[in-house]
């Protein structure tokens, strides 16, 4: 169906040209499900988009052989490509909130494919749109078609995006990180839907940074690194007998691994009792209680909207609880003016999900750390602890890789020697192999300093690897809590079991 | 939606009240007697003084004077010009039409030209040429543009009349003069908005459906690019108000600009106050329209 030999893609960067893809060869046969796996910047998205002539503005694409559906596409004019797009191949991107036009209704977006390719009778199109929405299991298709992307939940939105990709009846579906922005249970549903399309005969090209996500679906896996294919083979071979060290690293990262020796818990650091937060007529946190001791890592798990971020804000003193108390290091931390909190503020630190927006973009690393360190303290030792060299000191946040940035965030958090660090999805924005390194680092910090960590995440796999205890939140309430092993092995609450079932694990497709 | 509109109307009324009050305070704060301020350079007789005192209730307590002034202003009664011996209402009403025509024509011309420029000049040298021309227009004083247009099209080729307000032909050059800088700024804003929208994932999705680039631009990106342009509407009302005063002078057109200039020159306070309040009305109307336009363009803002 698709044959590519020696694909090279370059982009203009000022006067120079940078190579994003450096000689990639592969083929996709009718009815296959192929996964393209690699870190951000490995060239996997550019490779996939080149297949429909959308490598990007200013991209130079060269190949030795390039056939799509039996036609040589080298020298294709814009209109030749347009005929392929939507009709032969459908593209599904990461987050439907931005991948569907936010100013247009879902129905208009799906119907656009039909209009452009002149499919079916004009008056019949609204019905076709509803049928497509039914095909991707969107309930009440008539009402949903009239709604805008922001009015739909993440899962429904992603389904609508898939409906728009399959509207033209394409034989090939290209899904670029189709579930990355979604909660675990929703991710599982979307993967099931893609599997369903595959069974119905569509060829799938899945692009992901996470081997675990694609392993259940894919027949074959192509592992990309630095613009080249590092390794290719059947999913079974890749998972069980990978030859390339990078592939082994990916497999290890996706399998998860218990880190952190348990540290004997010390004195109580922070204590929350009967926290309750009401916004308008919605109660987002109900009766939340938590005690964290020195040296403990407590995991707080829940899907978006479960109230876990609000809990973090209440503990951090960014929002005032409607009722209940927070005590930190034996002092009242809620219900007091900010002035009273300020002397112990430095003992409580935060690591956010996206360090790029948590840093002042105009500050160098030196200045970022300087603010956190005491006067006269030099930043080098703290950088060394987080595994960075002094060479990053004079760089700006955007000049660092995602992993380096999160290490700087960790360095800034540990610099004032806090007793508690609240980590809000600290690794969710990172590639899996980098995730593993940052988790190792956090576990090490706890072991060395005895700092307590409150680790908030929607990713159960991450929590299992690092936390001692776990609290599961659902609809603003803690539905289950206990030692991490006990909760994972014998989940008592049905919601916890659903969450656990949705965690992608390395599996070989039957 | 209804709540948003109601809130907008209430704030609009509040702005008008503030403008009317500020104008009134300015009258009080002017040096000398209020009666002197209102007379300005007009005839000063005991009879006129008596008229002013009774019209402005100057013999009654300050609170009553102020409330009565507001009450009259709310009813559209803007007082009397003792210089022109006519109600202010008539002075302004008689001149407002030519100004409205000019402002509307300039706004329509400017917005249309900006849209055409931003959409058609997307690539390579055309884009650079257009962008340079826009910056040139923005940085040139409007009266200079007006004089150049006059000398070419009226004096040299005689296509359009030199001055006055007779027929549509007399409107062409003034509207272009006032509209060109507007087009320059808006085209830049729109082009920037289009660039950003075309970089968004939804544009990639749209292309992946097989849409032409032009269709992606018009059906998807343009609405996104309109948002920052709508923000410029407030600025636009300022440019129009300030611009007409100058343009009407250059082209010898009747209108509010002439009236304002004379009123300021002769110290005709009642007329000046009315113009201030009118400017506030224009501003409130335009910014209300802008807020409604946001709601119309972006469904995400419609949530209460």
Image: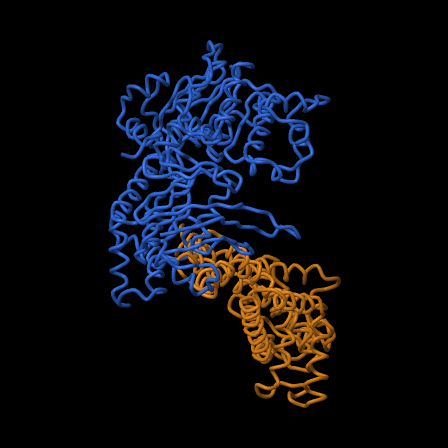
Chain colours: A blue, B orange
Q: Residue at x 37, y 32 (%)?
A: A237
Rendered view: A312 above or below B79 = above
In the drawing, does residue A503 fall left or right of residue B110?
A: left
Q: Is residue B60 visible?
A: yes
Location of residue B266 by image quarter: bottom right
In the drawing, does residue B183 fall left or right of residue A62?
A: right
Rendered view: A241 above or below A63 = above
Residue A392 horizontal/vertical position (percent): 66, 32
Give the camera-side residue of A64 and B113. A64
Q: Residue at x 50, y 56 (%)?
A: B197
Residue A73 horizontal/vertical position (percent): 44, 59
Give the residue at the far bottom of this rendering: B158
Location of residue B234 by image quarter: bottom right
Give the camera-side residue of A417 and B141. A417
**Looking at the rendering, in which quadrant would you find the N terminus of chain B?**
bottom left
Q: Residue at x 50, y 57 (%)?
A: B198
Rendered view: A506 above or below A175 = above
Residue A166 horizontal/vertical position (percent): 32, 53
Location of residue A87 by image quarter: bottom left
Q: Is residue A331 visible?
A: no
Give the camera-side residue of A308 and B62. A308
All told, the count of numbered labels is: 0
């Amino acid at each position: 169906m698709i044959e590519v030999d020696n694909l090279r893609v370059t982009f203009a960067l000022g006067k120079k040209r940078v190579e994003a893809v450096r000689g990639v060869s592969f083929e996709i046969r009718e009815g296959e499900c192929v996964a393209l796996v690699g870190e951000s910047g490995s060239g996997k998205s550019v490779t996939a988009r080149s297949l429909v002539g959308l490598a990007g503005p200013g991209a130079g694409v060269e190949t030795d052989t390039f056939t799509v559906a039996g036609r040589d596409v080298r020298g294709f004019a814009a209109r030749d490509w347009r005929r392929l797009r939507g009709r032969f191949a459908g593209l599904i991107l990461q987050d439907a909130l931005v991948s569907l036009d936010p100013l247009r209704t879902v129905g208009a977006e799906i119907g656009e494919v039909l209009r452009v390719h002149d499919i079916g009778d004009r008056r019949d199109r609204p019905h076709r749109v509803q049928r497509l929405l039914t095909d991707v299991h969107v309930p009440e298709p008539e009402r949903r078609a009239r709604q805008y992307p922001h009015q739909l939940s993440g899962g429904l939105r992603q389904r609508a995006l898939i409906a728009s990709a399959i509207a033209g009846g394409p034989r090939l579906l290209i899904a670029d990180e189709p579930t990355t922005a979604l909660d675990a249970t929703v991710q599982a549903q979307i993967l099931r839907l893609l599997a369903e399309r595959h069974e119905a005969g569509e060829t799938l090209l899945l692009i992901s940074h996470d081997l675990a996500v694609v392993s259940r679906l894919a027949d074959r896996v192509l592992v990309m690194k630095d613009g080249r294919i590092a390794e290719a083979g059947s999913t079974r071979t890749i998972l069980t007998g990978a030859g390339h060290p990078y592939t082994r690293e990916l497999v290890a990262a996706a399998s998860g691994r218990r880190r952190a020796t348990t540290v004997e818990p010390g004195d109580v650091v922070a204590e929350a009792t009967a926290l309750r937060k009401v916004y308008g007529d919605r109660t987002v946190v109900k009766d939340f209680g938590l005690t964290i001791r020195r040296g403990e890592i407590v995991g707080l798990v829940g899907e978006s909207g479960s109230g876990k971020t609000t809990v973090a804000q209440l503990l951090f003193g960014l929002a005032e609880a409607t009722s209940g108390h927070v005590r930190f290091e034996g002092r009242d931390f809620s219900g007091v003016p900010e002035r009273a909190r300020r002397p112990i503020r430095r003992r409580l630190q935060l690591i956010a999900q996206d360090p790029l927006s948590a840093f002042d973009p105009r500050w160098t690393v030196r200045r970022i750390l300087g603010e956190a360190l005491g006067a006269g303290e030099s930043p080098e030792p703290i950088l060394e602890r987080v595994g960075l060299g002094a060479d990053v000191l004079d760089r700006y946040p955007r000049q660092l890789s995602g992993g380096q940035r999160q290490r700087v965030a960790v360095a800034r958090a540990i610099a004032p020697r806090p007793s508690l660090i609240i980590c809000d999805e600290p690794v969710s924005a990172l590639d899996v192999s980098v995730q593993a390194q940052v988790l190792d680092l956090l576990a090490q910090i706890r072991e060395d300093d005895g700092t307590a960590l409150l680790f908030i995440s929607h990713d159960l796999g991450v929590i299992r690897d690092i936390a001692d205890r776990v609290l599961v939140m659902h609809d603003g309430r803690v539905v289950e809590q206990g030692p991490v092993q006990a909760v994972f092995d014998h989940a008592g609450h049905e919601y916890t079991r659903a969450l656990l079932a949705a965690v992608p694990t390395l599996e070989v497709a039957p | 939606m209804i709540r948003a509109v109601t809130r907008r109307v209430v704030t609009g009324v509040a702005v008008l009240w503030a403008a009317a009050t500020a104008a009134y305070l300015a009258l009080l704060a002017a040096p000398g007697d209020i009666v002197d301020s209102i007379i300005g350079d007009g005839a000063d007789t005991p009879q006129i003084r008596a008229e002013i005192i009774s019209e402005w209730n100057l013999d009654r307590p300050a609170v009553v004077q102020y409330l009565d002034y507001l009450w009259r202003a709310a009813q559209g009664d803007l007082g009397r010009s003792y210089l022109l011996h006519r109600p202010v209402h008539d002075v302004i009403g008689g001149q407002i039409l030519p100004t409205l025509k000019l402002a509307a024509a300039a706004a329509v011309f400017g917005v249309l030209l900006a849209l055409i420029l931003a959409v058609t000049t997307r690539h390579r040298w055309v884009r650079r040429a257009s962008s340079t021309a826009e910056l040139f227009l923005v940085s040139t004083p409007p009266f200079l543009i007006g004089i150049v247009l006059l000398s070419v099209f009226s004096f040299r080729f005689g296509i359009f009349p030199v001055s006055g307000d007779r027929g549509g032909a007399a409107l062409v050059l003034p509207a272009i003069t006032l509209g060109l800088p507007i087009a320059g700024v808006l085209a830049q804003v729109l082009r920037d908005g289009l660039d950003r929208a075309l970089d968004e994932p939804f544009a990639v999705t749209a292309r992946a459906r097989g849409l032409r680039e032009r269709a992606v631009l018009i059906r998807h990106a343009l609405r996104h690019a309109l948002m920052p342009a709508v923000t410029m509407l407030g600025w636009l009302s300022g440019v129009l108000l300030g611009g007409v005063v100058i343009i009407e002078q250059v082209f010898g057109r009747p209108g509010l600009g002439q009236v304002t200039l004379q009123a300021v020159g002769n110290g005709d306070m009642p007329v000046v106050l009315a113009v201030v309040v009118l400017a506030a009305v224009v501003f409130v109307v335009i910014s209300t329209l802008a807020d409604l336009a946001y709601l119309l363009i972006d469904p995400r803002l419609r949530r209460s």
